[in-house]
Amino acid sequence: MSYIIDRRLNGKNKSTVNRQRFLERYRRHIREAVNEAVGRRSITDMEQGERISIPEKDLSEPRFHHGSGGRRNVVHPGNREFQAGDRVKKPSGGEGGAGGRDASDSGEGADEFAFEIDQREFLNFLFEDLELPNLIKRHLEGSRSFHRRHGGIVSHGLPAKINIVRSMRQASMRRRALTAASRRRLRLLEEERDALLGQDQSPERNERLNDLDTQIDRVRRRIERIPFLDEVDLRFNHHVKVPVPVSRAVMFCIMDVSGSMNQDMKDLAKRFFLLLYLFLQRNYEHTEVVFIRHHTSAKEVNEEEFFYSRETGGTIVSSALKLTLDTIKARYPVEEWNLYGAQASDGDNWNDDSPGCAALLEKELLPRMQHFSYVEVMPRSHQALWEHYQSVQERCGDVFSMAQIDDPGDIYPVFRRLFKKRMEVA
């Protein structure tokens, strides 16, 4: 068996193949570091790379070496302290490479191995095994997306697309058509010549044989003058551009900016939505994002205003859900778009509004959507909105999910749980 190792160097003298093997080997450490980075980073540096540290014990590899060999008789002393299966504690001092210990005048070791992953690698680990649930609706978007498909054989084209088999077949048919009469003539002359060769010699016979040889030679030269391959024989593969139906999706990001949402709550919600926005931008080409902020009233805003505006007020959650429904009816036909929603709030709402929110979500939005997620950030205790949404989840759990985020460390695990890949049902 032969192995081909790609040693071509990429940027900064890095081999892509070797680096991918290295990243795969230490995937667990990288995933843990990425998870921790999402919790401690600010919104502005979410897309940066990360420094990964690997403990020395995980870098060790098995090694083969020569033993002493031969037969030996050894007496091992017993002990009164350890039993079979006991774990021996490490010495309390004199060990290098493990920071935080007291100073020692002996021992040596090695620091943890650390390396950097760039932005692309960081996002790859961040969003691996994630997807939008139930992304099935496809629509023909015209000329925006194409793939090339074999469109038959043509007589003119680029040299790179020449079809050798069809060209040789065409040349063979041309030669057979142009030489059919000559080959029939040649066959008759050769049959007559063979018949004369079986007769007794005579002047007339010899003269006829000479004449037949001349005619046969002339016919053969006529056949050989037909070119083996002519320009008219060339045939080329033809490829046509065919429009590809694509899955178009729109994500409605609904964030509560009312007065009950303090700055820490808003920061958690913004981190969650930024993670969602990066995920959509990186993994899906034909996906739109609609940003909606609400307090007592809701409005559609751009990305900059959604993340950085300081507007606040009272709380009426139904205003955001109604605006989402109106936007769907006006711009996103259900039969053409995969519709998704993600809502972040502290759950505090005007009491008379929460039942209407649950009814509007269950009867109007969920029948139109592929999936809707509700995230409650730092709740002091679950409010009426959570309780009403729970009843909706019991009836519509396949397209509706809920989660709670208490601190920045919960953001990434919750995000992975909401958008993990579902098993396909055959």
Image (cartoon, rainbow, N blue to C red):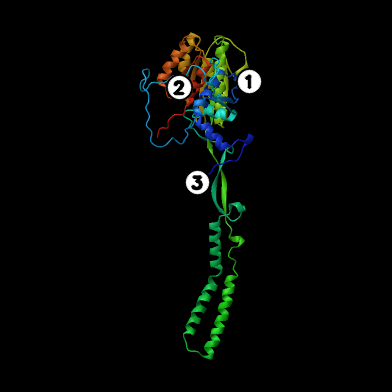
Of the numbered discs 2 and 1, the one sitting upstream in the chain is 1
Q: What element carries label 1?
A: helix
Figure check: 265 above or below 243: above
Figure check: 202 above or below 9: below
Q: Residue at x 46, y 11 (%)?
A: 384
Instruction: Say which mark, if any, is on residue 277.
Output: none
Q: Is residue 28 left or right of residue 44?
A: left
Q: Position of residue 291 (x, y in %)?
A: 58, 21
Q: Where is residue 153 in the image (x, y as percent from the top left)?
A: 55, 53
Q: Hey, what amino acid is under mark 1?
A: Glu
Q: Nearer the viewer, residue 34 or 68?
A: 68
Q: What element carries label 3?
A: loop
Instruction: Say which mark, if any, is on residue 304.
Output: 1
Q: What element carries label 2?
A: strand
Q: Which of 155 and 29 is in front in this view?
A: 29
Q: Which of 221 and 331 is in front in this view?
A: 221
Q: Residues within 10 Å of mark 2 (few under 14, many from 20)?
A: many
Instruction: Say which mark, if any, is on residue 400.
Output: 2
The span from disc 2 to disc 3 (Cα, nearest Å) is: 51 Å
Q: How crowded is mark 3: few (under 14 residues within 10 Å), some or many (20 or more)?
A: few
User: To which residue does mark 3 refer?
Assistant: 2
Q: Quadrant of residue 108?
A: top right
Q: Hey, what amino acid is under mark 3?
A: Ser
